[in-house]
Amino acid sequence: MKKTKIYDISRLQNAIGNNKSYLAEIIGLFINQVPEGISKIEKAIVNKNWEAMHHEVHRMKSTFALFGMNEQREQLIQMEVHISKKNNLKEITNLINKVSEKVNFAIEGLKKEKL
């Protein structure tokens, strides 16, 4: 069974005028920075650092929108609701784990993109 892409870079391509070198640079930033952001969120969860959680979650939402990862963006929005209320760390943890799993899958695909 063939895996389907969970991202869509067409919006990104349109936004940058299909500049392949710039697209490769942005994809590289996603590959390097999104996992770092997830790690920061996981650390903030352990430390119950609501401000750090909010900062990273908010920062990542636009990245997921740009890469057409709408389900993961919605999960980040759900996290923001819990973070704003400073409750439900278990659900925040569940959501970031789901996001992380899909990010790893997306990174696999992005590394194989023919630019």
Image (cartoon, rainbow, N blue to C red):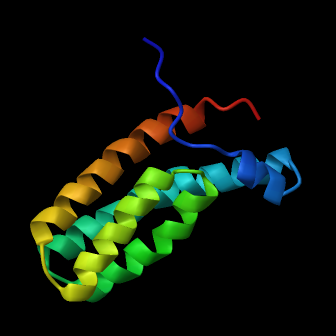
Q: Where is residue 40 in the image (x, y as percent from the top left)?
A: 31, 69
The residue at 33%/50% (across/down) is 100
Q: Where is residue 61 in the image (x, y as percent from the top left)?
A: 49, 68
The residue at 50%/39% (across/down) is 6
Q: Position of residue 55 (x, y in %)?
A: 39, 82
Residue 86, quarter of picture = bottom left
Judge from the rendering whether residue 20 lies leftward or rightward of residue 57; answer left or right. right
Q: Where is residue 65 in the image (x, y as percent from the top left)?
A: 57, 60
Camera-nearest residue between 89 and 36: 89
Rendered view: 42 above or below 10 = below
Residue 115, quarter of picture = top right
Most extreme residue toward the top is 1
Judge from the rendering whether residue 80 lies leftward or rightward of residue 106; answer left or right. left
Judge from the rendering whether residue 106 lies leftward or rightward of residue 49; answer left or right. right
Q: How many labels does the image show?
A: 0
Rendered view: 105 above or below 68 = above
Residue 73, quarter of picture = bottom left
For the N terminus, give its image quadrant: top left
